[in-house]
Image (cartoon, helix red, strand yellow):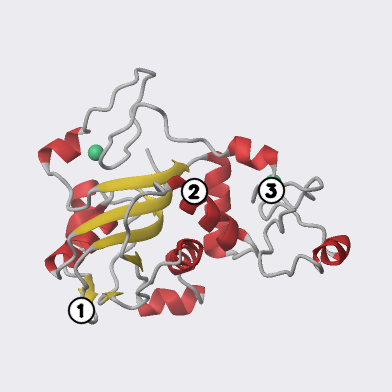
């Protein structure tokens, strides 16, 4: 018998707990059927669109069309990214977009945990990771929002895999203009010098975690700082990959 989204409850107390607080989908609030073991209801899970088979094997950019091909995208060919690969739970679209918005701006109980579980399921279980690092928010943005959604995801991932997480290894030194509405080139320029290290990067493989990836300028800037600081390899894991 699983304890659904409440892994801290002791097995003996679980039936009683479930009677008073029946587990519900953290996105739509529908009560889960008895012994349901997923972290979202079936309807919401159906609404999360996976990446199409045709996507860039490096940056996970989805390709238009239905052909099944694993060629690199133009951007990765022109300027190979510093990170080794991007794992994405699905397309930043429809239900997944709604879930991320709820999580980011209106933190709903259970969403960080449930999205963290999906993220953990998405990353190859045999990938050797030495350290989990969240993409940081600038202090000002953190004060506005009161939490960093990437940190909550990273914390959940690290908890499930029993890995160390470096919360403050990477910091956002200066606040940048919002990336929204900027072209890919402008985004890269906007982020120049934005991320810094606080402390020493241990050698080895780092998994960098963020909620959404659009052009990849943010994860590229962070990966570069980590590799220049001594990381052997950086992998990226995000919930939503924008087309
Ligand atoms: Zn639901
Ligand atoms: Zn690519």
Asked if residue 84 lies left or right of residue 17, the reply is: left
Q: Quadrant of residue 139?
A: bottom left
x then y, percent, for residue 50: 48, 35
Checking the image for residue 200, the label placed there is 1
Q: Where is mark 2, residue-wise?
A: 121
Q: Is residue 220 visible?
A: yes
Give the crowd class for mark 2: few <14, some 14-19, many >=20 residues within 10 Å. few
Which quarter of the rendered picture does the C terminus lie within? top left
3 or 1: mark nearer the eye = 3
Displayed quadrant of residue 67: top left
Task: For residue 215, say whether it is visible.
Answer: no
Q: Rounded to the nearest whole Å, what is the CA distance between mark 2 and mark 3?
A: 14 Å
- What distance separates the C-alpha of mark 1 from that of mark 2? 29 Å
Labelled disc at residue 46: none
Q: Secondary structure at mark 3?
A: loop
Give the residue at mark 3: 37
Image point 22% across, 55% down: which residue? 220
Q: Please provide percent x and percent y for residue 73.
A: 22, 33
State how far apart marks 3 and 1 are (Cα): 40 Å
**Drawn side of residue 63 relative to residue 20, left or right:** left
Residue at position x 37%, y 71% from top?
Answer: 137
| Earlier residue among tags 1 and 2 | 2
């Amino acid at each position: 018998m699983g304890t659904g989204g409440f892994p801290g409850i002791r097995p003996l107390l679980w039936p009683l707990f479930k009677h008073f607080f029946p587990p519900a989908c953290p996105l739509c609030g529908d009560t889960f059927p008895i012994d349901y073991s997923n972290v979202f209801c079936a309807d919401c899970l159906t609404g999360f669109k996976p990446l199409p088979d045709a996507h860039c094997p490096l940056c996970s950019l989805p390709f238009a069309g239905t052909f099944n091909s694993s060629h690199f995208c133009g951007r990765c060919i022109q300027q190979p990214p510093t990170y080794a690969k991007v794992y994405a739970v699905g397309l930043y679209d429809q239900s997944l977009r709604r879930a991320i918005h709820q999580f980011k701006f209106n933190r709903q109980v259970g969403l960080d945990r449930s999205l963290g579980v999906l993220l953990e399921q998405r990353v190859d279980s045999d990938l050797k990771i030495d350290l989990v690092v969240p993409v940081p928010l600038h202090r000002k943005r953190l004060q506005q929002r009161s939490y960093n959604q990437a940190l909550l995801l990273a914390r959940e991932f690290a908890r499930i895999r029993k890995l160390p997480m470096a919360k403050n290894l990477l910091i956002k030194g200066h606040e940048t203009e919002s990336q929204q509405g900027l072209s890919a080139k402008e985004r890269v320029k906007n982020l120049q010098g934005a991320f810094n290290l606080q402390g020493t990067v241990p050698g080895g493989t780092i998994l960098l975690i963020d909620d959404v990836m659009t052009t990849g300028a943010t994860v590229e800037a962070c990966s570069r700082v980590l590799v220049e600081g001594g990381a052997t390899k950086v992998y990226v894991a995000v919930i939503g990959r924008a087309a």
